[in-house]
Image (cartoon, coloured by chain):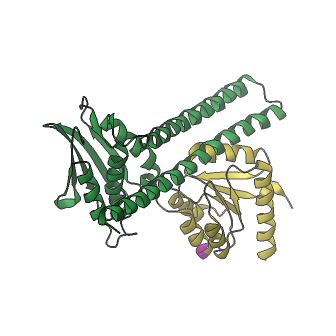
């Protein structure tokens, strides 16, 4: 599997965090874009569909869980990794039910995140003909 | 149980709710600052490993360091507000600055307001005389009014908090501006009767005016 082909969209209202994460993942040969709120993320999907979305839960306006619901409804092939600073067990369970790929807590090790992104991409490839 | 005892018990529970809510917001913010610092330090590590040391790279290192300093500064402001907030409970009555006590409450509630895209606007009269009262109870009263506003208002609204001095008293006016939700997302966390009894304990008064405005008047000395 060619890792350089994996398209990732990071969705986080903490601009500094989203940008730094994007830079580090790019150094690991991933194609990374950023969106700073839920509405922007959904609008990006109309232009280009990422393979994997890395999604924060608590954001101003549209919350991460609502973004996950919408993504799974309109773009079910996109794999969604939740990356949150404050996730509860209940939210982890909800994300799983809604079809989230996995649930990570901030701060996450970059190598763990990169490995999860690759795992999510493999799952997407296995599910899509 | 005597009604005063019941009120005290309910009040303590609601104050615990306020503390819990503030701590939940605080820890979330703190985790964000740590995550940004963690990624920034990690990025510099990645750059060192890749042998990046050109003039352009050095400028990028400096930019990352500035970002880390900025996060530490933001975290420090939150820690300071939380520390001052918890120490308000050290003694029942004390002399304090009204604007500072509201300012720290706003700093700790801003995350919740941001979540709903509601701006908290301060319009404070400078040079207010010091109050001799119970700052912790006053913060509880202001919290209860702000919390209700945050529940009732639609996103992209604002709540203005005004302070002013009047004869041997100070007043706090809380003015919500924006569309009210047709159905509240939650019930107010503090019942009005508890707020009214609490303000009486401070010998003050609360008036809920038309248009959702709330006026709180407190004497300079509560004892």
**Left or right of A40 in this view: A93:** right
Residue B163: percent from the left, percent from the top? Answer: 24, 41
**Predominant SS along the magenta part:** loop
The yellow-coloured chain is labelled: A
Residue B69: percent from the left, percent from the top? Answer: 60, 30
Q: Quadrant of residue A65?
A: bottom right
Q: Colour of chain B?
A: green
**Left or right of A37 in this view: A2:** right
Is B29 rendered above or below residue A70? above
The quarter of the picture where the N terminus of chain B appears is: bottom left
Residue at the image point whose x is 81% and y is 73% from the top = A126
Extreme right residue here? Answer: A1
Q: Is residue B170 visible?
A: yes
Q: Nearer the viewer, residue B64 or B191?
A: B191
Residue at the image point whose x is 63% and y is 33% from the top = B68
The quarter of the picture where the C terminus of chain B appears is: top left
Q: Is residue B78 magenta?
A: no
Extreme top residue here? Answer: B55
Is B96 rendered above or below residue A63? above
Q: Give, as a single range, the part of the protein colored magenta.
A: A73-77
Extreme left residue here? Answer: B167
Q: Is residue B50 visible?
A: no
Residue at the image point whose x is 32% and y is 34% from the top = B97
Residue B155: percent from the left, percent from the top? Answer: 38, 60
How many numbered circles are shown? 0
Extreme front residue here? Answer: B1
Residue B44: percent from the left, percent from the top? Answer: 74, 34
Q: Nearer the viewer, residue B106 or B7?
A: B7
**Left or right of B111 in this view: B140:** left
**Left or right of B42 in this view: A68:** left
Q: Is residue A76 magenta?
A: yes
């Amino acid at each position: 599997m060619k890792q350089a082909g994996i398209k990732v969209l990071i969705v986080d209202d903490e601009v500094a965090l989203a940008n730094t994460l994007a830079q580090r993942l790019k150094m690991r040969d991933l194609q990374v874009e950023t969106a700073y709120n839920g509405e922007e993320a959904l609008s990006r999907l109309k232009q280009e569909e990422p393979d994997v979305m890395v999604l924060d839960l608590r954001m101003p306006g549209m919350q991460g869980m609502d973004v996950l619901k919408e993504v799974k409804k309109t773009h079910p092939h996109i794999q969604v990794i939740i990356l949150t600073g404050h996730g509860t067990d209940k939210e982890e369970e909800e994300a799983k039910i809604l079809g989230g790929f996995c649930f990570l807590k901030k701060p996450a090790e970059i190598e763990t995140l990169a490995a999860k992104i690759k795992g999510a991409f493999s799952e997407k490839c296995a599910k899509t003909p | 149980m005597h009604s005063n005892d019941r009120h005290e018990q309910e009040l303590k529970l609601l104050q615990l709710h306020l503390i819990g809510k503030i701590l939940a917001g605080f820890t979330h913010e703190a985790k964000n600052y740590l995550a940004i610092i963690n990624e920034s330090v990690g990025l510099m590590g990645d750059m060192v490993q890749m042998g990046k040391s050109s003039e352009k790279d050095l400028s990028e290192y400096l930019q990352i360091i500035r970002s880390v300093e900025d996060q530490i500064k933001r975290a420090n402001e939150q820690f300071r507000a939380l520390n001052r907030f918890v120490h308000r409970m050290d003694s029942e009555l004390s002399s304090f600055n009204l604007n500072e006590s509201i300012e720290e409450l706003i700093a700790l509630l801003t995350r919740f307001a941001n979540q709903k895209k509601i701006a908290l606007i301060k319009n404070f009269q400078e040079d207010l005389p010091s109050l001799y009262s119970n700052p912790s109870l006053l913060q509880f009263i202001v919290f209860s009014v702000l919390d209700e506003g945050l529940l009732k208002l639609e996103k992209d609204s604002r709540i203005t908090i005004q302070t002013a001095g009047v004869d041997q008293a100070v007043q706090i006016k809380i003015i919500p501006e924006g569309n009210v939700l047709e159905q509240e997302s939650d019930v107010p966390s503090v019942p009005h009767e508890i707020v009214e009894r609490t303000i009486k304990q401070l010998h003050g008064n609360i008036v809920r005016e038309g248009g959702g405005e709330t006026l709180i008047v407190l004497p300079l000395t509560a004892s």
